[in-house]
Amino acid sequence: MVWGKDGTNGSTRSDVDSSMDTGHSRLHELGYKQELKRDLSFNIVGQWAVTTSIDFSLAQLLQVIILLSTGGNNGGGYLASKYVVIGFHGGILLIHAIINSLSITWLSFFGQLAAIWNVLGVFVLMILIPTVATERASADFVFSHFNTENDAGIHSKLYIFVLGLLMSQYTLTGYDASAHMTEETKHADKNGPKGIISAIGVSIIAGWGYLLGITFAVNNIPYLLSTDNDAGGYAIAEVFYLAFKSRYGNGVGGIICLGVVAVAIFFCGMSSVTSNSRMAYAFSRDGAMPLSSLWHKVNKQEVPLNAVWLSAFISFCMALTSLGSLVAFQAMVSIATIGLYIAYALPIFFRVTLARKSFVPGPFNLGRYGILVGWVAVLWVATITVLFSLPVAYPIAKDTLNYTPVAVGGLFILSVSSWILSARHWFKGPITNIDT
């Protein structure tokens, strides 16, 4: 990626993707406003879907924590209904919207607190869980065992490996949050890309260490995945619960550890709403959203208040599909991964093709390796877009069909139709309010 020149503190370029920057204006000159608007559509809808999935997963975790705290699945514990879960989801979004309505000073404080909590929490859990567990997996099991036992009808190691990539790709989405916050970042042309790279680096190291520690506490995989266990099939919760129950006779410690995870997810959702609101603000400032004049307003503390509450509301509406069908909900949030990566790849593609000679690199760039890395990124996104559209269960039926192509394709059709019928007449591309 290459970060184009956009000034320092207070730079207010259109917030789409870190790889574009000055290339935005170049692409505008080349007449590729349609592709830019399509990228914006995938990005903002993907952002909302990410918030939906994060906060809904937290709501489900709260459901499991309550279940274990009241006796567990096998001890008469309380299993919250889907309506209670959606209520949890709405409450979480409400708190996130309130926090994001505060000034940037408070957001900075919560962001720093979140960073400390996540780093310390990861290291505590990766050491504590395998230490407490009375039965630990061998190193041979952790590093060489490939589990193919599942009820999805898929037993090919290669196929399982490919499907497993989805979770890692999902985990690494959202690193562009640093780009969305550049307008409130000092020396954004350097600190923005540094934030992206450091976010990925920390996630890889800390995430791998966390997974490694938890895996050493895993023994009976089929039981962990079974809906008959105390956590009702929530594998990680069952690992935590059994680790403490096997040593101390009860799983209270495991429930507390789940609380640590819940707080980490809460902070993640909070940051996601922050990113959503800044994306919606920039998108509407470019006049690319219905009622744009409403969503790009900021209050006296320079917070895009309307965009914050819009993002929370849409994320809640997306989760409502879970009440009718989990299959429909999964299709909805699938945009969170594929949609965002398409949004990341589009500007990179135009950077390495049409704007290859006209793009003006900023102070942070990959030099002669930029084009090579760009092509690798584009080809990788093209590959995972196909892989993640494959069936995730066999035999294929209406309840097991992967509706990801439908969701992503539907968004693509809506974007193109919007451009043809309306946007091409008024969308002028990104609007900047600094001197070029």
Image: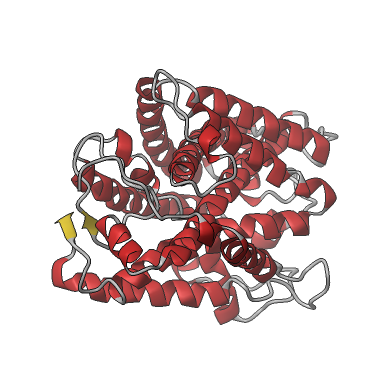
Between 138 and 169, the one nearer to me in the picture: 169
Left/right of residue 314 with respect to residue 293 in the rendered view? right
Res 435 quadrant in image: top left
- Can residue 135 be seen in this snapshot? no
Between 289 and 308, the one nearer to me in the picture: 289
Percent coordinates x, y for residue 197 in the rendering = 28, 53
Percent coordinates x, y for residue 299 in the rendering = 45, 21
- Can residue 51 be seen in this snapshot? yes
The residue at 32%/54% (across/down) is 18
Left/right of residue 129 with respect to residue 59 in the rendered view? left
The residue at 49%/39% (across/down) is 268
Left/right of residue 195 with respect to residue 145 in the rendered view? left
The residue at 37%/38% (across/down) is 119
The residue at 41%/51% (across/down) is 207
From what the image shows, is residue 292 above or below residue 213? above
Between 44 and 397, the one nearer to me in the picture: 44
State the quadrant of the N terminus. bottom left
| The furthest residue to the front | 425
Left/right of residue 24 with respect to residue 235 in the rendered view? left
From what the image shows, is residue 73 above or below residue 413? above
- Display colour scheme: secondary structure
Total marks drawn?
A: 0
Between 12 and 193, the one nearer to me in the picture: 12
Percent coordinates x, y for residue 158 in the rendering = 55, 81
Percent coordinates x, y for residue 260 in the rendering = 52, 32
